[in-house]
Image (tube, rainbow, N blue to C red):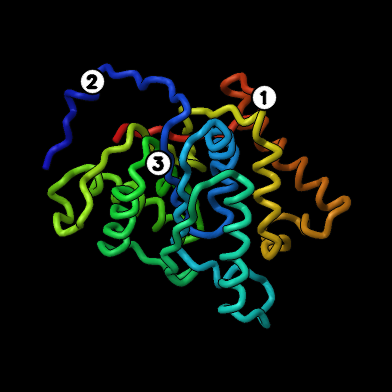
Amino acid sequence: MTSNLYRDLGATPAPLGVPARALAVGAHPDDIEFGCGGTLAGWAAAGCDVTMLIVTDGSKGSWDAATDPTELAQRRAGEQEAAAATLGATRVVRLDYVDGELEYSMELRRRIAEQIRLARPDVLFSHDPWQRYQMHPDHRATGLGAVDGMVAARDPLFFPEMAVAAHRPTAMLLWSADTPDHWQDIAASIDTKIAALLCHSSQGETTMGNAHDGGAARDAFDKRIREWAARSGATAGIEFAEAFKRLKP
């Protein structure tokens, strides 16, 4: 198979309006909220059907060695459902690979491709697998699985045994990109993004500066997210934004 290079010559991507359907693929519960939660919240409020696909079970997301991984995974599944409801997402799908042990494989590509064909998103989100110095192996594997899964999902000769037709999204947006070229204004939805992140109380110590304790820690977390969104939007002249690398499927 060869890429259709002619189709891309001189092409300028059209601006993204609110799509009918969006699918976000994250390695762990809370990754999607950090990466594109504001965009999803804004689109959901405008009528977009949002699916959140969580690849691992989140069972290693604690610094406490006494934590029971099975109980943590169950707790994080509940937190993800609450966060999805806060964002206005329609559904959460979990693949339940073991946290921290995800490896890129043809099976992973196939399972993500299947979810893309089932959800049929106009816009697909995930981790940028080419982000420099990304240490977490699950983030790298998930991003690569999502990009390769998108290629497989769009072309009908991949996985012909699937009982669902091929599907080509209009755009793929990768968060945490070193060289973003697409920005989504989240000024109207940044409060919802923060509220969804705070649903993940099990991660208060590991990723949120103990924001779950309330008070000054909660205020500091709120300030950090707003400052991050302001830095992301500065290049594009947007008050609060989420930044992405945009790919044309």
Across and down, in percent, residue 211 comes to 78, 55
Residue that badge 3 annotates? 124
Disc marking residue 9: 2
199 or 234: which is nearer to us? Answer: 199
222 sits left or right of 125 in the view: right
Q: Quadrant of the C terminus?
A: top left
The alpha-carbon separation of the residues under discs 1 and 3 comes to: 24 Å
Residue pictured at 55% horizontal, 53% vertical: 31
| 175, above or below 159, in the image | above
Across and down, in percent, residue 104 comes to 33, 62
* Image depth: mark 1 or mark 3 in front: 3
Across and down, in percent, residue 132 comes to 47, 47
53 sits left or right of 72 in the view: left
Say which quarter of the image contains residue 97.
bottom left
- N-terminal of the pair, mark 1 or mark 2, is 2
The alpha-carbon separation of the residues under discs 1 and 2 comes to: 32 Å
Residue that badge 1 annotates? 239
43 sits left or right of 240 in the view: left
Residue pictured at 25% horizontal, 62% vertical: 106
Looking at the image, the residue that sits furthest to the right is 215
